[in-house]
Image (cartoon, rainbow, N blue to C red):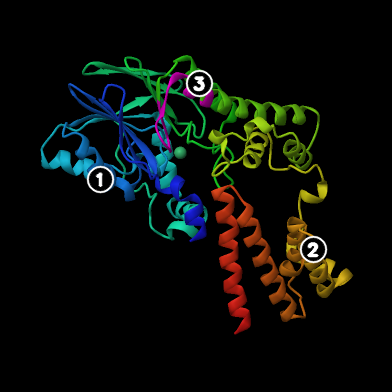
Amino acid sequence: MKLTEKYRKMLFGLYPPRSFANGNFHKISAFSNVGVVETSDGLVIFDISSRINGSKVFNSLREITDKPIKYIIFSHGHYDHCFGYGPLIEEIKENKWEMPQIIAHENTVTRFEKYRMLDKYNNWVHDQQFGSVIGKNKQYNSAQEILNPTILLRGNENYTFKCGEYKFELYHDKGETDDHIWMFVPEEKVLFTGDFIISCFPNVGNPYKVQRYPKDWAHALDKMREKKPEYMVPGQGPLIEGREKIEEILTITAEALHFVHDEVVKRMNEGKWFEQIYHEMLDIFPEKYNHEILAQVYGCYRFAIHAVYRLYHGWYNTGNPTDLFPAKKSEIANEFLKICGEKECLIRATNLFEEGKLQLALHILDVIINATNRLNTEILLKAYELKIRILLQKEEKESSFIASNIFLNEVNRLKLKVSNLSK
Ligand SMILES: [Zn+2]
């Protein structure tokens, strides 16, 4: 419950539909944002949200306008941007209207193929990331059924089309994904960013997700800024109005991405390994990025450091050959317990906890928890209970929704173990 409250606004997109510019432009919020442009020839829709939000999007759209849809653009293939098409397509079929053109980057098609191959795995990842808030196994993001694109942007090509009185400029850049498209309507200087901007720190180093592209992302934001937009519809969050405000947001977000990228790269060139880079990066975090638009409520700076390192580096990331072909953690833990015993470990972990050294306390507790030839179930139970307390304390202070979920998921798993062990 607490988590829901903490992230309520971000997760459920509690922003009412907004009309703007000359009244022909609309933003509908349904977790992610849906952009709508009314033209004399019909509607151009930028993103259609997720499957569970399809009805909400449809109802909001039909309160605004009854015009038929001519184009749907997928900003990228994530489940919350292109799976909410159900009611829109039903309406088209009922009215025997012509099907709209569906525009996407060619990598979106590859992405859907990958999603089909990894259907069960993706559901598991989704549960890890959102499970403690919106429940599990809801098949939110299955790509077994999708709306197939009819117009594809290939490679780095851009695409421009006219619909009614407006020209629509589509640009492909890598950023959160390799299939991202952003849209600009020059007549009214309206920018639709997709997830390049999500009203918080870029989700560039998501711990569960495949590689993302911090430098390309920053360049894309630089390109958007050159358009001098007057209105900006981000992937999530409220409509942003005014050239100066938009310029400020695009600039500081791009700067933060350039910063984390360039500083990690500099340290890689200095021959440093991940641990050193990570802790040095934490020490040099610039105060100016404690900015409202870079609130670390979803993606965060700590994850971004990983993203840059992983972009250019293999999986061997410690420089210590011990880690190349490691023994099982349980075997290592068994050996440590032979040296100092589980009781001593628990006492030390408790002391560290009381001193506020939560992370160190977790490492010591894991020696007890990972060991397999324990003699004392009571101490294991206490180790579980202390780990639960520590994770809850960490979650309390945690700004990132993704990190919060990781802590809370483990709390739930440990509570189950405690209950099984107490029987
Ligand atoms: Zn996305």
Nearer the viewer's eye, disc 1 or disc 3? 3
Contact (Cβ within 8 Å) of mark 1 with mark 3: no
What distance separates the C-alpha of mark 1 from that of mark 3?
36 Å
Residue at the image position 62 percent from the left and 35 percent from the top:
290
To which residue does mark 2 refer?
332
Quadrant position of the C terminus in the picture: bottom right
Q: Could you tell me residue 141's position as x and y percent? A: 39, 49
To which residue does mark 1 refer?
86
Mark closest to the chain's N terminus, 2 or 1: 1
Is residue 387 on the magenta stretch?
Answer: no
What is the tally of numbered marks visible in this picture? 3
> In the picture provided, is 327 more to the left or to the right than 181?
right
To which residue does mark 3 refer?
247
Residue at the image position 48 percent from the left and 14 percent from the top:
226
Bounds of the magenta segment: 232-249
Q: Secondary structure at mark 1?
A: helix
Is residue 237 on the magenta stretch?
Answer: yes
Can residue 11 be seen in the rendering of this structure? yes
- Counting other residues with Cα less than 10 Å from the Cα at mark 2, is it few (<14), some (14-19), or many (20 or more)? some
Q: Could you tell me residue 247's position as x and y percent? A: 50, 21
Mark closest to the chain's N terminus, 1 or 3: 1
Q: Nearer the viewer, residue 141 or 111?
A: 141
Can residue 127 be seen in the rendering of this structure? no
Q: Quadrant of residue 349?
A: bottom right
- Counting other residues with Cα less than 10 Å from the Cα at mark 1, is it few (<14), some (14-19), or many (20 or more)? some
Q: Quadrant of residue 295?
A: top right
Q: Nearer the viewer, residue 53 or 313?
A: 53
